[in-house]
C-alpha cells in the first residue's frame, strides 16, 4: 500500500500525532490506536455511531484492504486537530475523509475524542 503524508508535520508534534492517528484509524493499526487514544476515548463515525476504544480496537481488523492513502492536511491548535485526505480500496473504490480530534490535554500526547467523516466518492 502506498501512503502519502501531508508534509505539514515538520515542527509540530501535534500535527504528526493527528496524522498518525488518521492513518491508524483508516488502516486498522490497533497497536498505534492503543498508544494514541486515551483509555476512555470515543470515536464517532458521523452519521453512524459512537464507539469506545475497545470497540474501535476490535473493529479495526475489518477495514477493507487499501491500495493508496493520501493525507492532504494535518493541522492542530490548542486541544484540537483536523486531518483530511482520501484513500482507495483494492476494488478501486474511492473515499474522502475528514477527521476532527480533541486532545486529552493541551500538550497533545493522546486523543480523547475523534469525529470521523467518511464519504464514498462516485
Image (cartoon, grey):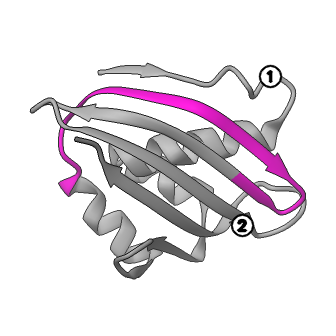
- What residue span does the magenta drawing correspond to? 62-81
Which quarter of the picture shows residue 75? top right
Reading the image, the residue beneath label 1 is 10
Q: Nearer the viewer, residue 7 or 33?
A: 7
Q: Secondary structure at mark 1?
A: loop
The residue located at (15%, 29%) in the rendering is 92
Circle number at residue 102: 2
The residue located at (49%, 62%) in the rendering is 116
The residue located at (27%, 32%) in the rendering is 88
Q: Quadrant of the N terminus?
A: top left
Q: Where does the image place residue 5, in percent across and percent down from the top left?
A: 56, 23
Above or below residue 37? Residue 68 is above
Q: Nearer the viewer, residue 81 or 57?
A: 81
Crowd class of label 2 (few under 14; some 14 to 19; many from 20; radius 10 Å): many
Above or below residue 115? Residue 27 is above
The answer to whether mark 1 and mark 2 are in CB contact below 8 A is: no
Q: Where does the image place residue 93, in percent across and percent down from the top left?
A: 18, 37
Q: CA distance from mark 1 to mark 2?
A: 21 Å
Q: Where does the image place residue 59, in percent across and percent down from the top left?
A: 27, 65
Crowd class of label 1 (few under 14; some 14 to 19; many from 20; radius 10 Å): few
Marks 1 and 2, the one that precedes in the sequence: 1
Amino acid at each position: 500500500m502506498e501512503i502519502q503524508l501531508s508534509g505539514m508535520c515538520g515542527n509540530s508534534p501535534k500535527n504528526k500525532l493527528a496524522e498518525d492517528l488518521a492513518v491508524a484509524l483508516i488502516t486498522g493499526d490497533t497497536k498505534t490506536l492503543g498508544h494514541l487514544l486515551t483509555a476512555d476515548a470515543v470515536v464517532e463515525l458521523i452519521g453512524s455511531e459512537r464507539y469506545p476504544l475497545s470497540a474501535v480496537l476490535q473493529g479495526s481488523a475489518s477495514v477493507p484492504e487499501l491500495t493508496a492513502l493520501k493525507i492532504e492536511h494535518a493541522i492542530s491548535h490548542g486541544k484540537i486537530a483536523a486531518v483530511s485526505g482520501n484513500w482507495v480500496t483494492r476494488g478501486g473504490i474511492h473515499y474522502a475523509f475528514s477527521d476532527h480530534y480533541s486532545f486529552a490535554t493541551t500538550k497533545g500526547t493522546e486523543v480523547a475524542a475523534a469525529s470521523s467523516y467518511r464519504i464514498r466518492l462516485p
